[in-house]
Image (cartoon, rainbow, N blue to C red):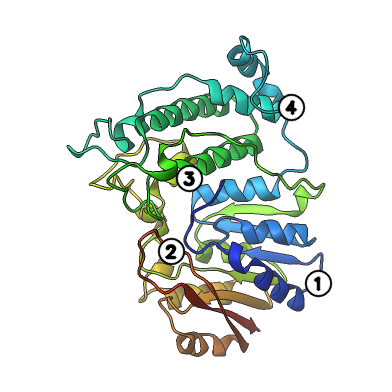
Amino acid sequence: MGHRYIGSKLRILDTVISKMQSLVTSGDTITDLMCGTATVSIELRRKNFRVIANDLMTYSYHHAVTGLKLSEEPSFIGAQEFISEILRDNKSCQFDDSGYGRMLSALSDVDAIKGYFWNEFSSDGVPRNTERPRNYFSPNNAEKIDGIRQSISYLYKSRKITEEEYSLLQHDLIMAANDIANIAGTYGHYLANLGGRAKDDLSLKKSQLFLKNDKDDHTVLRGYAEDVSGDISCDLCYIDPPYMKRQYAANYHILETLARGDEPEAIGVSGLRPWRDQYSNFCTKTKIRDSFKKIFSDMNCPQFLISYSEDGLLTVEDFEKLLKPFGTLTIDEFSHKRFKSNKSQLKSSLTEYLIHIEK
């Protein structure tokens, strides 16, 4: 399973974590203020830090809960009746016989439905606001997504699964949908013809969970970085902001719909959900400076570490001018392989910066 998110720190994870370890001590509290895939947050947990993870996007919230708030594999004890009903005619599970394995086996066997995803995001669908069907998923996969979504929603609303179990199932569905989405890189638009992995059948997979008896040491938040920063106290704040003008809420609108479990009006050729409630100032050159200043001023934190890119809205010189009034500034520079859409003409390497400020 893959995230397929622009800006994922997986490729430079060792560099980022090593820098943090040089700044704080194991057991200290680190805030991952825009956690995205939660890759950095999970690795910090592995390194015995206390983690506060935040993001504006709901799908990021589910990723972070899955990575930080599980100390044992969920049992799905409250959903046993649902699971048994679905699997009653099966001689064996597709997965192992644990509660988690049986749950994924049951969800894999639920009836497909020609519902919201089939209508709005498959080539056989009948979208409400455009005459041309959208080709994000094969019709069979869209039906399967609708069936699984309906079952997860029923289990959650009827309180047959816990909050953590709900986040895990949403995470698993998002990852499975990512694997077979008919896109070049983001969900800003779909490919004209179904190809590659998009022809494969949607397949839920057990997540490789990092289980450790420390879940109460970690906090997962969802909100604007500028808004939550005043309520956070930590030893180091790591910030990995968006680098470009394109809003994540638009680039990943389908994943947000999966994460929220809703059926918003799909607008235009791309089927965007209404996303202004998740508009980020960090994607706007005229507002990004004020947002950074608010975070630095409001958060009870002695030092910050910012990941940034040569492609970003601000230059290194911009950052120097912005940050110097708040403390001592140092900048590390290195190159790595960039994330590219299938037909992107961008160069393959990217210069990345780690900007450290100590108040």
Counting from the top left corner in percent of width and height, residue 126 is at 24, 30
Do we see residue 327 in this rendering? no
Pick the quarter of the image with the N terminus: top right
- Pointer 4 or 3: first along the chain: 4
CA–CA distance between discs 1 and 3? 36 Å
The amino acid on which the numbered mark 2 sits, given as a three-letter code, is Lys
Disc 2 from disc 1: Cα separation? 35 Å
Q: Nearer the viewer, mark 1 or mark 4?
A: 4
Residue 154 or residue 107, whichever sits in front: 107
Q: Identify whether 355 is placed above or below 175.
A: below
Q: How many marks?
A: 4
Q: Amino acid type of disc 3?
A: Asn
- Amino acid at pointer 1: Thr
For this view, does 40 lie left or right of residue 265?
right
Marks 4/3 in contact by CB < 8 Å: the verdict is no
Read off the residue under disc 3: 178
Image side of residue 80 versus residue 230, left or right: right
Q: Taking 92 as reference, is 250 left or right? A: left
Q: Which residue is mark 1?
A: 25
Q: Residues within 10 Å of mark 3 (few under 14, many from 20)?
A: many
From the image, tell me which residue sits under label 4: 98
